[in-house]
Amino acid sequence: MIDEFKAFINKGNFLDLAVAVIMATAFGLVVASFTNDILMQIIAAIFGQPDFSGLYFNLGNGVIKYGNFLNTIINFLIVAFVMFLVIKAYNNMRKPTTAETNTKECPFCLSTIPAGATRCPNCTSELTKTA
């Protein structure tokens, strides 16, 4: 069992995951600072209140803290938008490899085949020029 654990730890996937978690944590702190220190201050200039956590109403003996919910929704939308921008920038920077540009998908078996193929080597279907 110890040898299996060592093999698991030494796999590249485990290290990639560890780095991703650390980077996500750091990225989350940056986005939280951006939200709290910049965007919420702009909201404060417009609406007069930088933090909605003080908004609530009483319902019988309970308290409905809808201000905390508003803060959470705003933070979520900002994080989602920033992640969208990061992924969009990454996709724009990523260039297709020569394998991606020199291949196509067989319309019958959906396997990847050379772009100039007239017959699929996997399912042996005859391909038209448009496939």
Image: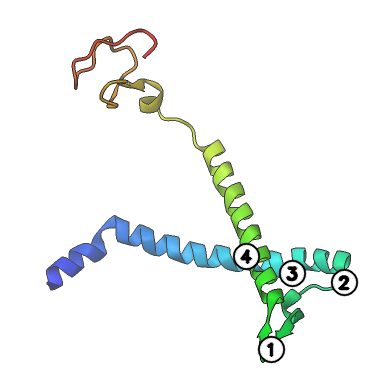
Instruction: Find residue 9 and name its label.
Output: none
Nearer the observer, disc 4 or disc 2? 2
Tag 1 secondary structure: loop
Q: Residue at x 75, y 81 (%)?
A: 54
Q: Where is the C terminus found, in terms of image quarters?
A: top left
N-term mark: 4 or 3? 4
62 sits left or right of 37 in the view: left
Q: Which residue is mark 3?
A: 37
Residue at the image position 12 percent from the left and 72 percent from the top: 1
Give how far apart the Cα atoms at labels 2 and 3 are.
15 Å
Within 10 angstroms of label 4, few (less than 14), some, or many (20 or more) residues?
few
| Disc nearest the viewer among 1 and 3 | 1
Q: Is residue 125 above or below residue 45?
A: above
Name the mark on residue 48. Answer: 2
Give how far apart the Cα atoms at labels 1 and 3 are: 35 Å
Amino acid of disc 1: Gly
Within the image, what quadrant is residue 68 found in?
A: bottom right
Q: Is residue 108 left or right of residue 94?
A: left
